[in-house]
Image (spheres, coloured by chain):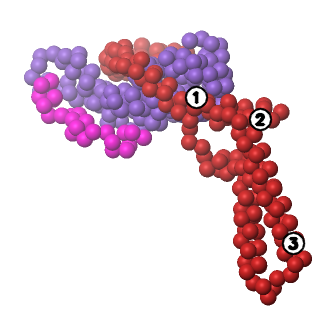
Chain colours: A purple, B red
Amino acid sequence: MDPETELNLIRKSIDGDHQAFRQLVESHQGLAYSLAYRFTREEKESEDIVQEAFVKLWKNLSRYNAQYRLKTWLCKIVTNLSLDYLKSGRKKKVMSENNFPAKSMIERVVHEDELESEELKSIVLRLAEQLTEKQKVVFILRDLETLSSEEVCQTLEMTPGNMKSNLYHARLKIKDGLQKIYKTKLI
Amino acid sequence: MSCKDYEQNIYTYPELSAKERSHLDAHLQNCRSCLTLFQEVQQTQQLINQIAEEKVIPPHAARLTGSIMSKIAQPSKRAFGEWIIELLLSKRSKFALSGLSSVLLFVFCFQFFDDPAQFKASQASSLTNSVILNAKLFRENFSRHKEKRTLFADCRSPFQSNQYYLNCVKTKLK
Ligand SMILES: [Zn+2]
């Protein structure tokens, strides 16, 4: 959606036009869901977060600052709701018990000649779960949702230096985690 | 600059400015250990890119849109402060207060008549007058309120926000 169309739809939505808002929902809910899912890794919870995010957006639309794209504002709302959820303890215990490094996974990895790409991916995701909150947020927005550096800074109200530092620590931890598994495998 | 100083930039190569990048490139050409680290980081990033490319899509997109739309269609709960302000500004408050004062006057008046020792004809008649006056005021407010209610009836819609209602009332009052 080009910025002009988007702004037009936002203006109509502020005036109470539900059809205009529906178009905004349809074009942005995919991103919102993807982001929520990257954080929570739960389908139902991600749907709830997306719904809550759009209701918030609708209620606060009159305060929209045209300087920013709707995307960054939405990402901010979804990120905050996702972090609230992760902190709330509502997240199923099963997930934390499954936390890396799970013995069964390492054993499986160790006994195979080559690391399956699917397994590698799931290891990366589990390593990402261990990051600090800021590192995790920056990593998910920048590396998984592939937002631009400027968009990440805008969404998180972070300086470029701060973002880079968090990104560095996140990537370092993930790379080191992967390397530890490689070493286990070689022994 | 030492190798340690380049470390963060090796990890954040895509985020570097052109100047920072050429600075690092020059170092990588002369430093084997930093080049090895750079290649390792690139490998990990490739794996992460693969994860990023696997798009996560909502499994029930249409249903999701539907439930969002039905949620915003519900009239939102009014904030208490907003409600108080609207109440004080409305004719409803006048109506309620004049009704209440009429009732109090009636009660007062009957108590007065019950006590013959304190009864004075002139006082009684002035009291009766004020009771009648109050009742009239009450009736006027009531009928005016009813008028307004029908006038603004079409402003009330479960599909519109409070802001819409207030704007609609404002336009009608103009
Ligand atoms: Zn070096």
What is the x, y in percent for residue A163?
A: 50, 30
Estimate the spatial distance between the alpha carbons at disc 1 and disc 2, rounded to whole Å: 19 Å
What is the x, y in percent for residue A1?
A: 56, 12
In magenta, the rendered stretch is A84-109
Q: Chain of mark 1?
A: B
What is the x, y in percent for residue A183?
A: 18, 26
* Left or right of A119 in this view: A4: right
Q: Main secondary structure of the magenta part?
A: helix
Name the amino acid type tagged 2: Lys
Q: Which residue is mark 1?
A: B159
Estimate the spatial distance between the alpha carbons at disc 3 and disc 1, rounded to whole Å: 53 Å
Q: Earlier in the sequence, mark 3 or mark 2?
A: 3
- Tag on residue A53? none
Q: Which residue is mark 2?
A: B170
Given residues B132 and A65, the one toward you in this image is: B132
Q: Name the residue rendered at 73%, 74% in the picture.
A: B110
Q: Quadrant of residue B50?
A: top left
Camera-near label (3 vs 1) is 3
Classify mark 3: residues with Cα within 10 Å, few (<14), some (14-19) or many (20+). few
Q: Which residue is mark 3?
A: B125
Residue, far right: B122
